[in-house]
Structure formats: structure tokens, C-alpha cells
Image: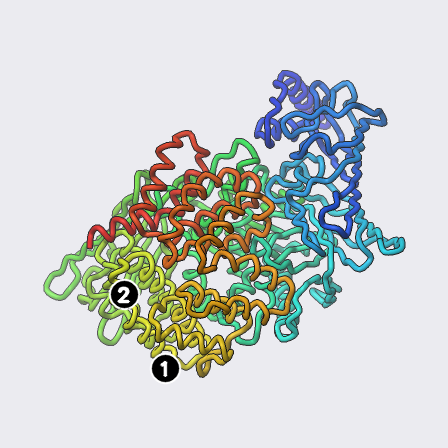
Amino acid sequence: MTKLITRFCFTAAFLFSFLLLRAAEPEVVKGVSRELATYRKKVISQISYQLSLDIPLERKKAIQASESITFKLLSNKYNLQLDFRENGDKIKTIQVNGKSTAVVFKEEHIIIDKSLLIAGDNQIQLVFEAGEAALNRNADYLYTLFVPDRARTVFPCFDQPDLKATYKLSLTIPDSWKAIANAQEENTLNNQDRKTISFKTSDLLSTYLFSFAAGKFDLHTGQIAGMQRDFLYRETDTAKIKNSMTEIFKIHEHSLRYFENWTAIPYPFQKFGFVAIPDFQFGGMEHVGAIQYKASSLFLDPSATKDQLNARSNLIAHETAHMWFGDLVTMSWFNDVWMKEVFANFMADKSNEGLASDSNFDLKFLIDHFPAAYATDRTTGANPIRQQLDNLQDAGSMYGNIIYHKAPIMMRQLELLMGKEKFQQGIREYLKKFSNGNASWPELIEVLDLYTDANLKKWNKVWVDETGRPIINYEIKYNQDKIKKFSIRQEAEYNTRGIWPQFFDLTLFYPDTVKNITVNMNAASVTVEALKGADKPLFVLFNSAGQGYGLWPVDPEMPKQVYTIKNPVSRASAYITLYENMLNGRAVKPVFLLNLLMNGLEREQEELNLRLINGYISSIYWEFITAEERKVWSSRLEQAVWAAMKKQKLANNKKILFKTYQDIFISHGAMDTLYTVWCKQQAPAGVKLTEDDYTSLAFSLSLRENKYPDILNKQLDRITNPDRKSRFKFIMPAVSEKAAVRDEFFNSLALKSNREKEANVTTALTYLHHSLRQSTSLKYLVKSLDLLAEIQRTGDIFFPQNWLQATFGNYQSAEAAEIVQTFLAANPDYNPKLRLKILQAADNLFRAQKLLKAE
């Protein structure tokens, strides 16, 4: 048997070598092509980077760097491509296996001649000037953000997720700075006003997970899971720090414990630490040992709403879940980037389930995921969960609502299909099998297939490989006052073929009771046999437990009874169904729904639901009724919101309504009321406002009229935190009452240097394109579309989507719709993924045109 195994292994190795020798040399193209990545995975292994960076205090001075890359090479038949998306002139010297060689640079790659390489152990040493595209340098701090393929913008590397490596980092920084990285500090050497921090060798990491941050940070050390953990931050508000610090560590503790127990794998890395970044591009980023968070998401004041508290808990749980899902087991290629995100979101939800009642968990899951998933999946630009990717330079455009919100819904349906216990067993096996390695979605499905009798490949084809959602319709036949037949059918919203196999709840409402039925919608049409002979209900509510996915029908009697529904999850599902049907022009008109939701502002007591319907009110008010209708509705709506705010008992509910009032007000009386609140910094009774709230109030007042010309300068003087002050100064021109100032601001965004703070740019664009300013902002739309490809090339992963949403999100005019349609028609060969992003962002604009014409 031993000889047979040896012969088999020899034969397999010979066959692999033979196939490798026959493989074509990868073409040298910009980015990291799938062809290049596949070849390098076959021939390169055991990679280790030693990287030293000398970071000057002066922001404008270049960062000098040196690097040693060691790796094992199976074959030196072809030249080797080393990724570096910078000017080749930045490479000062290069040595390959001890031999100096000239720098050969082509299409974002350093070409290492095959004659300098050997089959076996190799070393490449470089001295260079670091690129800065992903260094996020500020006046007194910087942080790296390399996802998905931006490590190559800073240092030469093999920038693909399935070539994991170890990193040994050395940072020379100003003596007053602190730093954090993937591994623990090894030693620090001081030299006058400079110091060099050397970190230990990291765990195995993909390049996009290698990270560090350095600068003027404060350090807090606390206990998590029985070990000392470091937290760097720049927050200066002592009330926020006092209110948040203990809770931040407590949530991390809970998340770590939960995932260790659920996965049956102890925390798999040598270090756990995190850093809060002002105006961070994302909510967070899962770097091993140095998780990055947006500071404002972590540091909350005592008046934080349930929504804010939930968001912080979910964010921390999400990034912690990534330690197992994404960091320990990483997708092989970024077409499966959704795998790590769906697990992080889904598992974050599961970890927080034990902290709340089942109804609160279900409500939070419903409101967090379904409206956002529908917002993309209902559009003609919808993309499947799993997408095609030929080059990593396009990987950033794959992110969006589908992978963050539809995918968790899909995963919950998969868990329902398999059963919780079998699902957990399958995931545990998957994590152990691919630990410290890479895996694809088909490989995960193969593992899960062992734990269920269901046809997962068939199920997977519709949920993962197709776009869109089903439209659900129903028919009830009665025999006197008894149900004779209750049938449900589904069809694709667009051209997608197939059915969506799923479970959902159906509730029949009676004067004194309800009847709940779970429906297994595993065919194009099903008859609910359990309802045969049931009494005729007052009305029917589909998806009453909030687990099913689709455009659900509206019982004509349901809107009249919606506020009598006792279960908050069912009410939320009803609100979502009404809004989605309004957008589709099916059974519900905008003015009708606006009036219905307005009448619920006093009656809806559940905070998450109140926030949901207030969001819908704002959307309908600004996007789906005409300017003339808005004038008619403004006074009535202002009075209703203010009256509801006074009558609501909970402080958080009062604040939600105050923020809605601030969003929708138009009248001079409301303007004077809000100015008095801002001027005296005295909120209405029961409402607690923070510095950030007064900042947004100042912006809202400035958008209306030039009645308070000094309000922005006065608010600027009130702000003490330097990071928030800098943010406010950046946004101010976008809110200016002077069109020339706004023009100058928008034109400045053509320069990449003025787009570096992407979160600030997005906020500024939202004000610039506010509904009240669109008559003068329409002229920016063409240029905004022209800049999109550059935005995608130079920005981080969410920036193209955020740029488009902030630009087009509130428009409703025919002129704006024509600009988008003309651009798409004039660019038939436009980047297909960016084309989808445009269609997604402009979907409400197109729907507004249809709805307004139908009125």
C-alpha cells in the first residue's frame, strides 16, 4: 500500500509539472488578472515580507522604504511579475538572489527576469519610495487600507488573496506618535525625536489584511477574553469616552466568546487590537490584530438611540466575526468576497441574538437587511450575490447592498432549510478544513451538501447566481365565510428565470385572534392546505415574521388596520411591503402612503419601527411627490411631526421625530423655531442634542434661505475637536448660499487630493444635491458621471457607490433622468459593473418619473 501511495503521489506531481510546463506565460496587463493570479498560485508558496518604512512628520515628505521578499518558486520557466501600482521610478534598487539588476517596469508590474530566479528558495530585495494611494496620510496620523488590491499601491507584493504570507514590519516615526499593526511590538529604538518600532512576525495573512496605523493617538488598554488589548483613538469628548469605553470592550468580549463557542475554534491569531479612525471610509475593516473602526460609530453619547447602539454592537460583532470568516479562511478570489461579508453580517446578527428577545432580534434583522437589499435588487442594475471577476482592479465595484444585505437573508434561508444544528456542523467542518487557507463558495457548498438532503446546488442557482426577487401574488376562494382555497404564486420581477425556494410566515387577522402559518414556497405556485376550512379573516399579512424575500401583496384591508397589528415585526413587514408596492406602482400611491405613515407618528411606539416609517416619510416627501404637492403638505406634516414629538414618551423616539422635523421643514415658522434651538442650544423638552446634532442643524438651516448668514462660522467656532473641525470646514462650501462657492467646491473634487476624505466628500455631496438646491446643482450631474471611472480607479471600495448615491439619490426631475439615460446611451461599452452602479443609484429617479406621470 505504501508503494502504491508513493507511486500515486509521484505520478500526480509529474502530471502537475507537465501541465505547468505547457501553461502559457501570463500576459502583462494592468491590475492583477485572473490568469496571472492562477499561474502564481501554482508556482509560488511560503511567502514572507520584511518591510521597513521611514515616515516623516511632515505630510508632504516622501516615505522611504526597504523590503525583502522571500518565497519558494516551483518553476522559473517564465519571468515573474511583482505587483506595484506606482511609477517605476520609485524603485531605487533591486536585488534578486543577491544580484543587482535593472528595474524593468511594465503595466503596474516589476518584471523579474527568469534568469535571476531558481526553482526553490528565492529572495527579492528592494529600496524604494512608498506609494501613498492607500496610506491615508493626514497632518499627524496615517492608516493603511489595502482592500481589495491596494497593498500594491504602497509596496511591491503578490497582491492576491490566495497568496498568504507572513509580515515583519518596522516603522520609523516621530517620537510622540503611537502605532499598531498585525503583530505585537517586539522592540522600540529611540533616536532623538524619532523612534523605530519593530513588530514581531505576523500570522499568515492575505495582502489586503496587512495593516498598520500610526500617529497622535491616545492609548487605552483593557481586558478582553482574559488578555490585555490595546485600543488607539483620537476622540476628545470626555463624555463620549466615559460613556463608550467600557461598552466597546464589553461588546468585543462578548463577540469573541460567542464566535469561539459557535465555531469551536479558539481565537486563531496572536493578537487582538483595534483603532478608531476619524472620518474612516467604512464602518470598520477586519485587519488581524489592528481592526479599524470609524470613530463616530464607536464613541456614542448618553443620548444615543437604540439604532445607534445596535449599529455599534453589530459593527463590532461583524469585524470580530471576520477573524474566523475572512481572515482565518479567506476567499480564493474576490468574486467570492461576499462569502466573508455574508458570514460576518449573518454571524454578527446571530451573536447579538442572545442579547435581545427573539422579537427584537427578528425586528432588527428585518429592518437592517430587507430595505437595503430591496433598494438594489429591485433595480435594473441588480447584480447577483456571486459575480464574475476577471481582474482585481475591478474588485472594488463588487461591494454593495447585495453582498451585505441580501446575502444574510439568503444565509438565513439556508439555515432554515438545513436546520440550525446541521448548518453549524457544516460550517465548523468548513472552517477546520480550510483553516489558514482559502476556499471558494462551491467548496463550501460541497461541505454543506453532506449535512442536508436538500438539493443545495439547485437552491444555490437562484439565490446566489441570479439577480432580482420574486413578485408574490395570491388568490382566496371562499365557500360562504370559510376558506375554500388559498393559493400563492410567484414570478420573477424582471427576466430572471426560476423560483425562489423559501420559507415565510402568513398571518390571518381576526377580531380577537390571529392565525399563523409557515409556508414552504418551493414551487412557482403552492396551495396552502392548512388554511382550507379556516374562517374568513379581516385581512391577511404576508411575510409577517419578516424572513421571506420578495415583493409581497397588499391585502386591501391591511392599510386600514396596520396600526392594530400588535407584533412589531409584523408591523415593520407591513410598512416595508407598503413602501415597496408604492415604488412599483402597485396598489399604493405616494400621497396615500405619506398620509398613512404620518398618522402613525404618534401611534408607533417601537423605536426601530418609528425610525423606519420616518425614513419612508422623508423619502416620499422629497422624492415621490411634486414640489407643488410638497408645499401643500409641508405645514400639515411639520405640525404632525412636532405634535408627535411632544406626545411620544421615550427620549429616543422624541429625537427621531425632531431629526425628521429638521429634515422636512420648509416654513418660516419652523425655521425660526429651529434657529432658536440652535442659537440657545436648548432642545425641545425630552430631546437631547449633541455637538454633532447642532452641526447638522446648522447645515439644515443654511440650506433653506440666507436668513442666518453667519450660522456656519458661528458653529465652526463652537467645535473644539480638531478632526470634527476639519470635517466641518471641508463641508461648509457645499452648503454655502453662494452658487459660485458651491461651483468652486464641486470643481475642486476633480483633483484626487481633494477627495481623500471620502466620507466627508459623500456628506458634502448630499448637501450639494439636496432637493432644495437641485435647480442649481443639476449642472454638476454630467461631470459627476464623467468622473466616475476615475473615482473607481483611485478611491476605496464604497466610494463609487457612495458618490453616485449622494449625487443622484434625491433627484426626481425629468432633466436629471435624461442626463443619466443620455450618458448610458452614449457609452455602450462603459465598465459594466459601474454601469450597474449607475442604474442602482438612479432607480428612485426613474421610478419618481413614472409615479409622478401616473398621478
Q: In this view, does 569 lie above or below 103?
A: below
Which of the two marks, 2 or 1, is nearer to us in this view? 2
- The residue beneath circle 1 is 647
Residue 263, percent from left and from top: 60, 55
Indicate left or right for 394 with 14 as reference. left
Q: Is the image coloured rainbow, by chain, by secondary structure, or in one colour?
A: rainbow
Q: In which quarter of the image is residue 283?
A: bottom right
Q: Which residue is drawn at 70% across and 61% down?
A: 232
Q: Residue at x 56, y 64 (%)?
A: 312
Binning the other alpha carbons within 10 Å of mark 1 as few (below 14), some (14 to 19) or many (20 upward) gives: some
Residue 4, percent from left and from top: 69, 24
Indicate left or right for 196 with 689 as reference. right
Residue 215, percent from left and from top: 73, 56
Q: Nearer the viewer, residue 21 or 632?
A: 632
Q: Is residue 789 visible?
A: yes
Q: Residue 732 carries which label?
A: none
Q: What element carries label 2?
A: helix
Q: Nearer the viewer, residue 759 or 170?
A: 759
Q: Which of marks 2 and 1 is nearer the N terminus?
A: 2
Do the CB atoms of the residues marked 2 and 1 lie less than 8 Å apart?
no
Q: Is residue 460 visible?
A: no
Q: Is residue 559 above or below residue 182?
A: below
Quadrant of the image containing the N terminus:
top right
Q: Residue furthest left?
A: 480
The residue type indicated by label 2 comes to Lys
Q: Residue 631 carries which label?
A: 2
Q: Is residue 106 above or below residue 232?
A: above
Indicate left or right for 405 with 187 as reference. left
Q: What element carries label 1?
A: helix
The residue type indicated by label 1 comes to Lys
Q: Distance between the residues labelled 2 and 1?
A: 25 Å
Q: Which of 173 and 184 is in front in this view?
A: 173
